[in-house]
Every structure is written in C-alpha cells, then in structure tokens.
Amino acid sequence: MVMELLEDPNEKDRSFDRRGLAFGYVQSGKTAHFTGVINKAIDSGYQLIIVLAGMHNNLRTQTQMRLDEEVLGYENSVKHTNKNKANRIGVGTLIGHEFFEVDSPTDRSENGDFQSKRALTFNKQVMVVKKNARVLEKLLTAIQNSPQAMYLKPEDEGIPDRKVINNIPILIIDDEADQASVDTSNMYDENDQLREEYCPKAINSYIRRIYKTFNQRVYLGYTATPFANILINQEAATTLHGQDLFPRDFILNLPKAYNYVGPSEYFLPPANTQDEEETVTQKTKELPLINYINYDDKFAPDKHKISFIPTALPKSLIDAIYSFIIAVAIRRLRGQEKVHNSMLIHVTRFKDVQEKIKVLVSNMMREIQDDVENSEWQGEHSFGLQKHFEDEYNQENLSFIQENFPNQFDTRYTSTWEDTKPLILGAIKSISVKSLNGNSADTLEYKDYSDTGLNVIAIGGDKLSRGLTLEGLTVSYYLRASKMYDTLMQMGRWFGFRQNFLDVCRLYITEDLVGWFQHVAHATEDLRAQLDYMADIKAEPKEFLLRLQSHQNLLITSITKMRSARQFKVNYSNELIQTTVFPINDQGFYRNNYLATRNLIKSIDQASKRNPKVDMRIARENLTHEHYYWTNVEAEAIIEFLEQYKTVSSATKADSKYIAKYVKSLNNIGELINWTVVLINTGGDEADFTETIKLQKGIKRKGTEDKIDDKLRSIKTVTSGDHIFFDFTESMYVKALDIKAKYSDKTHPKGTVALKTRALREKTNGLLILYPFNNVDEENKSKLTGDLSYENETKPFAFAILTPETSAKEADVDYVVNDSVVVEREEEYVL
C-alpha cells in the first residue's frame, strides 16, 4: 500500500517531490513496517535511503541492528563487515533467495553513526542516522561535496547548498517524525504573517537541506502521534531550506494487528457500547490489568525538584514488584523460561532521583529474597506474595481477560499458587535492577541473554518514553504526568503485543492519568476515522481540514509546534445545519448518499408513523406538495444515516460524522431521542424511490448555484420558507409567528428570529429534512458531472437538521486545526 503512494524511481529526467506520513500505533511494529518498505524501495530502484532514527545512540543502534537483519543480511559493525555467506544473518540466510548486496555507511556500534570519512556511492545505500545537528551537518557536507552534486546555474557556484543531485532517487524515512524533525522556530512576524525568509531550528534545517539537494525525492515519516506533523504550516518555506516537512500528499493509517493491545483496548469501551462515558469508568475500574495508585510524598511527589531524596517505597510499588516476580514465575511455569521480562518504573525525569530509587528497589529485592529464602513462607513478603497472587491472578480476573481479550490468551495457561510457589525464589534471583539514563552505565543487552532470558526492573525517565523497546514488558509503574498528547501516548510503553502473557501484565497508574489517556485515545481514534474518510474520498492532507480534539487541561503538542494551530468549537445546540456543497464529479459520493437516504426511509417507513401530508396549518401556508412525513423516529436510525452519509471533506459544520457523535452524546442524557423526518417531494415527473414511495425530480435553487472550484459546487441553501416548522405543534407555530412579529425589525441582531424560533423545540426533539435536488438547469445541462438519477441510484440528496437548545456540556466539542490548510467556503465551517 505504501509503495503505491510513493513515486516511480525509474522515471529518469523527471523531478518529483512527495511527502507523506505513516500513522501507526505505539509499540506496534512500525520498524518492521518501514524495513519492508525499504526492501521494496531498493527493489524498485531507490538508490539512497536515509533512516532518521531517534535522538540517542541506543535508538539508532537498535534500528541499525534491525536493518542489518532485515535489509542488509549481514552484521554491519566494527568487528563484522564481511558479507561472505558465513557471516550472514537474518534475510541473508534465507534459502533459495539470491543474496542482494546492499551497502551501509553506518554500523551498529556505539559510534557507528555517519562520519565524514564514510563513502557515499549512491548505489543501493541504506544508512541509519541519529537526529543530531552535527551528524546531519556532516551528512549534508558529504552529499554536497560528492562528485554527483553539481551547480545548475553559474551564478550559484560557491554558494552553500546550491548544488543539486539529479536522477538519484532518495527516500528519507523519518522514524518518530514528530520528534526533533518538526521546526519549533518562530516563522511569523509581528503581524502574525509568515515570514518569507526565516531560520529553522538546526535538525529541521539540515533534514530539509539534505532533502532539497535531490531532484527525485520522497519523505516518509513514521509516528504513532502525528499531531505536531499535522499542524506544520504547509506554506512555510525558504530559499535555502525549501518547504517545511508537512505531509501534504498522504497520511496513511497503518492497520492494527488483531493481537495488538493499545490505548483503545486499555482505556476505551467496546464499540457497541451505548453509554460510553459510564462504561469507560466501569471498564478501567474492572479491568484487572490496571491498578490505581497515588503520589507518595516519601517516594515521588507530584511536583519535586532534582534535590528530592526518596526515603521509602510505597506499598503500591511493593505490590508492583510482587506482580513482576509472580509474572516471571508464571511464565516459567508455562514453559516460557527463555523469554525476556521487563518491569518499568517511570516516576521522575531527574536522573539523580532515579538513581536513588534504584537503590531503594535493589534493597527491597534483597529483602524479599531473604524473606522467601529463610522464613519458610511465614515472613511478611512471603505472605504478601501469596495474598497478591490470590487477589490479582484469581479465576475471576482470568475470566475477565479471556472474555475481553480472546486473541491474547490460551485457555491452557491457568495456574494456582501451589503451582507457582516453587518457582518464586528462582524468579527473584533472576531479576536485576537497572537505571537507564545518561548518568548510568547500565544497559539493556537483551541479545546477550538470548539463551536464558533477561529479567530486569528498568528505572528511568525520558530515555524510556519513546522508541526504546522494553522486551517482554509485563509490569509498569507510572506516575510521570505529561500534559501533552504526544508525550503522554509515547510514554505508554505497556502498549504492544502480549501474546499468551497479557493476563500477568499490570499497569499501576493514577486515576487522573487514566482519564487523560482516555481522552487522548478518543482523540486519536477520531483522527484515524477522519484519515480513513480522507483516503476514501481520495483527498490529500493539503486540502483536507483535519481536526484534533482538544482538552481543557491538556496540550495537543508543545506550544512551539502549534504556531499554525487554530482553535474552534463545534456545538450543534439550537442550530440549522444543512449540506450545501457537493463534488462536481464523484459518482461514488452520490451513490453512497442515495443508498444512505433510501436505507433510512425504508427502515423508518416500517417502524414509525408516516403521514400523507404535514400538518394542515403548515400546508395552508405554502405546502401544496405531497411531502413524506414520519414522526417518533428513534435516534438510532438518524445516527446510522449520518454515519453512512458522506459530506465534503472540508466542511466542519455540516459534517455528518460529527453530527452523529453529537446526537449520540446527547442521547446519553436523554436529549435528541425523538425525531421527525420529512422527505421533500417536489419538481414534477415521478420516479420510484422505494417499493412504496415515488419521488419527483427534487428542489431547484434558481440563481444560487455557485461553482467554488474545479471540484466543488455550492447550492448555498436547501431549506425553504416554513420548512423549519415541519415538527411544530399549533401552539409552537403561534409562538413562532409572535417571535417573527416582535424581532424581525432592524433594531435586533440578524438571526434573532431564527435563534429564538429554534429554541421553542423540546430538548428531546430533532428535525431531519431530506432533499432530492435537481442538478439540471433550464437548458437541460447538468451542473454536476454524470447521469445522476433515481434509475442509476445516484440522485443527489441534501439534508437539513434542526436541533433544540441545550446547556449540556456534552454539546461542546473543541478542536484544533492547521490554519494553513485552505478552506474554500467559510460559511461551511464553525471556525
């Protein structure tokens, strides 16, 4: 799928520049995905592939090792550079496949990053480079000084970065593309206008200058938290650096593996849940994987300084250590003796405090070992381990996990305390305690324990929060609060694959942090749904207004990455919402909406009361047509219709998916549960719509059609006259006339009459009006491409929705958008 979105590298003498993003999941195998892309890219003809891998040596080395096995086929290190058959690893050992030689000017050693002395051949080369300004500067210099680089214009000679390399296709893969790569400089002047020339931050600057050197280039970012990338100003550019790294051409949702356990599985309710908010709380409190903890002033207060000295481990952390010991023992009981098991303790960003916690944890491990070894299972920790096993790993919890995560658990794996007890001491003795930070010499060398398995308690902060993989992570003790979506999600190292040991995994976390994770998980799933829709209608990020749900206590990303962000609020309380913008050439769009409308009508025509005409008090005003009219329609039918119906990608107000969410949220508090549906029937010349309903050609809005651009046309309005009164009772209609008489003069703000009239509706009631519209003008010329008709099941349908006033907090949804994405019609948007 990804390769289809890239460019063909074999088309010589043609420049190309394609920029995109792959949106994955935290700890979900993004590296495996892009190694597959690299292999295919080499096969298809890309000559240079640069992988930007993290900001630390350990992450770069980790990625290089993966590429050695999965791309190069040999170990590329100071000790091993021989590509002979005897030294091959990974793909190099595949039987029946010709060894395809790929060169790498970087290696897996600690100092294996790009060096100036490394040769650049631009012939099937793959390098793994740290996101470090000095390293990237060396790489840029080497590229600019290569024999393939040349000046295109005489006046450019001697000017830095003016050399270009033609017909050598390059693919830059930016792992964790939202980290360090996003420019955080201030590119705006005092009038909040984009500067023509500005100075990007160093890492962003060098990436763009390297990229700009090649005339055939593709940039592909990978991240599980693309919020900052989506908010990059797509117009930002300088002469030296070229355009910024906004993924203008595509953002691809990577599929989620069936056995992946991520934020949705931990924190969100099942998709078929009606009362979403209640079930979220219920699920997280019932989920045996999660244990709620609190900050402890003696251990790690919410706010503390670098000088803080922790003096004692809280009971919750001792319980977490018990969990880890038991997890190691149970896995050994299951025959998983040689697997790795890790425990994460992430409670502070200060390295000195982490070292002190390491001492406390090491002392506790010795204390537990001494107790189990010498008390004949009568000591404090011996009893504690048994009680913890009985509380946490009982049949009730096991059944819950089996029911909620059927893909993660083998029913053969059940154990009792008597089964597990003999393996506890061996598990304790196998566990080491390490601190992972820049001040510590500790490392996680899992490969050195491939025969026995490494069991480790890892204490750290920033080094554990992104990219670094903790093999076999079973227990996480997490107190580190971040108020940024991306940082928070990346700290979730417990997400990932836990096949056949999820039941022994535990997360110790505060209730507030769970609430934050829930919101970010909701916002992330909402973004994924938008991206699926964008792909479905074949739109591109540069023209599609992606919306990021905001939160009153959280930031989507750092302030410096949000300079192009604009906030807006979606609130459908007391609104007239109507679809007025339609694609000029999209048969699939119209067929989808035709079927959505017909499905709705068929379902409610059987379940609800249909009247041959609307109330006579309205009919005597202006209605001579035989409109179809249903009362007491349940909200579920409306929601299903809105979820199937498509609206144009750029609209934020008349967005059917967001209206559906709004209706759902108000249903939870007993509002918008009762609907009236009216199917407009006008225009002459009837045709069959359903087995029992014939419809005329539909509405025309003479003199209102407006071509927005080559893709879109607007009919400006669909409602007419007294249509807004379709669901009014006689008394409501009289009140509406009084409002019109009282507020229609120029002394009152425009819109007062409409606002006060809509407010007459009961909070339980909504009105949906469906409009077939006639896209043929007086000269019988279609204003939309194609034969759009009832016969072809492509007749265009618009809708109008009228909602009552509500004061419920559920009515408000706050969003952030990229202000540089151009919207075509402001009246369609709630900005």
Image (cartoon, rainbow, N blue to C red):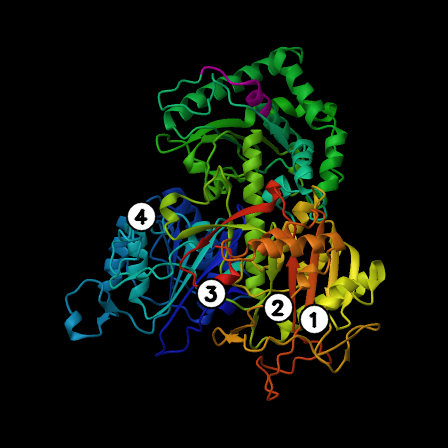
Q: Residues within 10 Å of mark 1 (few under 14, many from 20)?
A: many
Q: Which quadrant does the N terminus fall into?
A: bottom right
**Disc 2 to disc 1: CB gap under 8 Å:** no
Q: Is residue 96 above or below residue 301?
A: below
Q: Nearer the viewer, residue 826 or 145?
A: 826
Q: Which residues are magenta?
A: 311-320
Residue 314, magenta (yes or no): yes
- Residue under circle 4? 132
Q: How far across and how far down the image is residue 65, in percent?
A: 44, 49
Q: Nearer the viewer, residue 222 or 500?
A: 222
**What's the residue type where badge 4 is placed?**
Asn
- Residue under circle 2? 718
Q: Is residue 112 above or below residue 333?
A: below
Give me the residue at 60% from left, 27% from top.
Answer: 292
Return the disc, 2 or 1, that comes first in the chain's sequence: 1
Return the disc, 3 or 2, that comes first in the chain's sequence: 3
The mark found on residue 543 in the picture is: 3
Q: How far across and how far down the image is residue 577, in percent?
A: 60, 59
The mark found on residue 594 in the picture is: 1
